[in-house]
Image (spheres, rainbow, N blue to C red):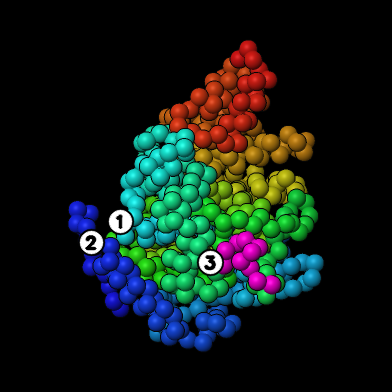
Amino acid sequence: MPTRSRRSSSTKTAPSARRTGKISRRLAAILWLSTIPQSWSQAETPKDDYASFTQQLESLKSDFHVPGVAVEVVNGVDSKSSRILFQAYLGDQDVESGQAVTAETLFPLASLTKVYSAVLLADLAEEGRLGLTDPVTRWLPASGLNDNVQVQHLLSHTSQGIPGERFYYSFRFGLLTAVAQKVGGKPFGELLRERVLQPLGLSDTYLYQPGTLSEPVRKRLATPHGFDGRSEAMDHEFGVSASAGLVATPRDVIRFGQALLRNDLLTGRSWARLTSAYKPGLPYGLGIFVQEVAGHQILWAYGQYDGFAGLWVIVPARQLQMIALANNNLLSDAARLINGDVSGSPLMLAFLETFLSEPGHVLPSETQRAKADLMTSVFLARFDEVHFEAAQDALALLLPTRSDWEERGDLNVMHAVMFLKTVAFHRELRLRENWDSELESLGKRLLAEQPDNPYAHYYLAELYAAADKPALAAGHYRAIVDAENFSTHWYTREAQSWLASHPNR
């Protein structure tokens, strides 16, 4: 395959030479796609019996009231060795019409789009048209950010607080829309299509906007559904940005991952930069999560609209990918993936147990399973008492003693227990314990590690407010409102509202 000469950061290659290299690389990608076997465009029966995985998938679909879900697991990156290990298309693309999910169903990718956007920005950077270390204000002087915030900080979700230091998943990623447009001289969607989708032959990936979706394509689009005690169809949230805005079939997402693993569009150096933790200990690279789970280095991304969810997992060392797309959001929302820990997802644990169980690698532990059960049950506890009780069982299994709280407690646990307490209050249900002292200790430990963490401040503030300790609550609410270099978010508005209603605190 034609390759582009790797250049050091101190060596500049003439723009014409860079373009020639890119054209060769993209041509090679298109030629490779023309050799894909027919089975890639048709449904294929998996060659192994993954009955347990199918059963777990069907159970998750039922538990989360998902109308329709599509899952594919593929091994390999080239036409000769690629193998579909598993595929399942369950339920309805549209409940009202009874149209079934198939391999041709299109799902909005939501935040999975961020990976495509990161590749686009890296592609522009390889050509020398922008630097990932450029201050955002170079391209967006009116952004309101200070000059210390760089393009790479937006890509890595490290722009808030001290830039480059802490991971806080942030809607500031969306500013990259305007950055790319300023650099590329075209609307963001056109740049994505011309520089990523077309060169890689992603013919079943489209911009999520009515004007670019033909009627035959729109008929393949899954209908979004919400669940609040019962499932209801919702309206589409059309729009294209760096944060979200693509729709695709599961198979086309897999093709995109394979092209990245082959370095079809980016050099290996750029791909390595995107897929390395931005800073040791952080769960994110540039546009994609990076995490070690059960002894495997995992790349992953998730998507979540009000009516859609997606989980995409890549195990580079095994050339293994899983993509799961669904037409409600509960598969993503319940696992609290925004905090950067995919092991809280029961779907991820099922994938590990099924496709990565081998000597030398640790399977998900009882602790991980209990944590995933806790996250799931807590989320569903607002709908029925069975899950309310199950959540308390999972918590007792995960954290039976105070020392376990100190060892295993994290932000997701704090969120889950606070949510469970809120459910108990609103539904007038009795908790077996209140866990207040454990939550207080956990919150203080989290803030000792990250003094500006808005979520830890918010959970502690809520804990103190509920315990009628307004002075302590006020201190944490003020820490949220007064934090430097944090964009206004839901927790800011909640803190401002509480402080406004307690003016003497």
**Lower sequence index among marks 3 and 2:** 2
Amino acid type, label 1: Gly
Q: Residues under labels 2 and 1: Cα distance?
A: 9 Å
The residue that disc 1 covers is 128
Residue 154: give x, y in percent of width and height. 43, 45
Badge 2: residue crowd in 10 Å (few <14, some 14–19, many ≥20): some
Residue sitting nearer the eye, 10 or 345: 10
* Quadrant including the N terminus: bottom left
Q: Residues under labels 3 and 2: Cα distance?
A: 37 Å
* Quadrant including the C terminus: top right
Amino acid type, label 2: Thr
Which label belongs to residue 412?
none
Mark 2 and mark 1 residues within 8 Å of each other at the beta carbon: yes
Q: Residue at x 47, y 86 (%)?
A: 37
**Magenta span covers which residues?**
206-215
Residue sitting nearer the eye, 193 or 39: 193
Which label belongs to residue 323?
3
The residue that disc 2 covers is 13
Q: Residue at x 63, y 12 (%)?
A: 504
Q: Residues under labels 3 and 1: Cα distance?
A: 33 Å
Residue 45: give x, y in percent of width and height. 57, 83
